[in-house]
């Protein structure tokens, strides 16, 4: 007979994920052992295995739950009927707020997904693509000239670059707030895409070779 779940199973599981994220972020995938995770969570190793059969499943869930949270926040914040600049600002602001107190999870997403199986990585990357699609649609709103061009994806990913790496330098008690940074990122994207097609499109390497 399967062992019944405790009433607080989900709460304990989330606590394990949060503590594991901090350990994966601090020690890396290799040194964040199940022994170390169990000790940090204040549970026995046997009890930890009641929640997760191995470290890779635990790592997968750290990233999966983080991406689920991000997708839910972004979906709730997205308002396609808003003016294009306002829509981008709402999405950027919502994503920055979702990253609050989630630096460890975000760091693990960026640095440790590569340790997972191909199947697990594919599932997580599909969740990332859901985020990208929403932001790509918003970017098209402010720069419709990018439709059907090779530049839409680089612009969208540049927006993510400005937001995703902010945790390396941003300080919550600093002079620049998350709202200030959301305003700045939005302005950079709006102003930067205004005359973007005036910039020569990159020439594919094969075409450049033929010209020589």
Image (tube, helix red, strand yellow):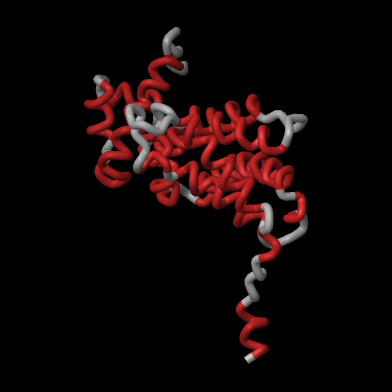
Q: Nearer the viewer, residue 45 or 162?
A: 162
- Residue lying at 64% horizontally and 41% vertically, measured from the top left: 135
Against 200, residue 186 (above or below) is above
Where residue 167 appears, x then y in whole percent? 39, 39
- Residue lying at 68% horizontally and 58% vertically, measured from the top left: 195
Where residue 121 appears, x then y in whole percent? 52, 47
Where residue 13 appears, x then y in whole percent? 41, 21
| Quadrant position of the C terminus in the picture | bottom right
Q: How many marks?
A: 0
Instruction: Name the residue furthest bottom.
Output: 212
Choose top left, top right, bottom left or bottom right for residue 39.
Answer: top left
Against 192, residue 101 (above or below) is above
- Residue lying at 46% horizontally and 31% vertically, measured from the top left: 178
Instruction: Name the residue furthest top.
Output: 7
In the image, is 68 to the left or to the right of 193?
Answer: left
Residue 37 seen from this side: yes
Against 22, residue 190 (above or below) is below
- Residue lying at 60% horizontally and 34% vertically, measured from the top left: 89
Against 200, residue 124 (above or below) is above
Residue 53 seen from this side: no
Where residue 129 appears, x then y in whole percent? 62, 45
In the image, is 99 to the left or to the right of 72?
Answer: left
């Amino acid at each position: 007979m399967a062992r019944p779940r405790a009433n607080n199973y989900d709460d304990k599981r989330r606590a394990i994920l949060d503590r594991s994220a901090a350990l994966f972020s601090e020690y890396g995938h290799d040194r964040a052992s199940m022994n170390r995770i169990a000790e940090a969570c204040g549970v026995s190793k046997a009890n930890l295995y009641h929640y997760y059969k191995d470290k890779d499943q635990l790592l997968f869930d750290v990233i999966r739950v983080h991406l689920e949270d991000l997708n839910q926040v972004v979906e709730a914040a997205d308002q396609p009927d808003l003016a294009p600049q306002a829509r981008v600002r709402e999405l950027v602001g919502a994503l920055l707020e979702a990253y609050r107190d989630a630096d460890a999870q975000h760091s693990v997403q960026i640095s440790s997904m590569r340790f997972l199986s191909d199947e697990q990585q594919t599932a997580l990357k599909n969740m990332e693509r859901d985020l990208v699609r929403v932001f790509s649609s918003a970017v098209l709103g402010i720069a419709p000239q990018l439709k059907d061009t090779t530049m839409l994806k680089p612009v969208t990913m540049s927006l993510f670059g400005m937001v995703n790496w902010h945790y390396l330098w941003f300080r919550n008690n600093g002079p620049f707030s998350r709202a200030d940074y959301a305003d700045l990122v939005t302005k950079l994207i709006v102003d930067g895409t205004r005359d973007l097609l005036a910039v020569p499109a990159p020439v594919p390497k094969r075409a450049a070779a033929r010209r020589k």
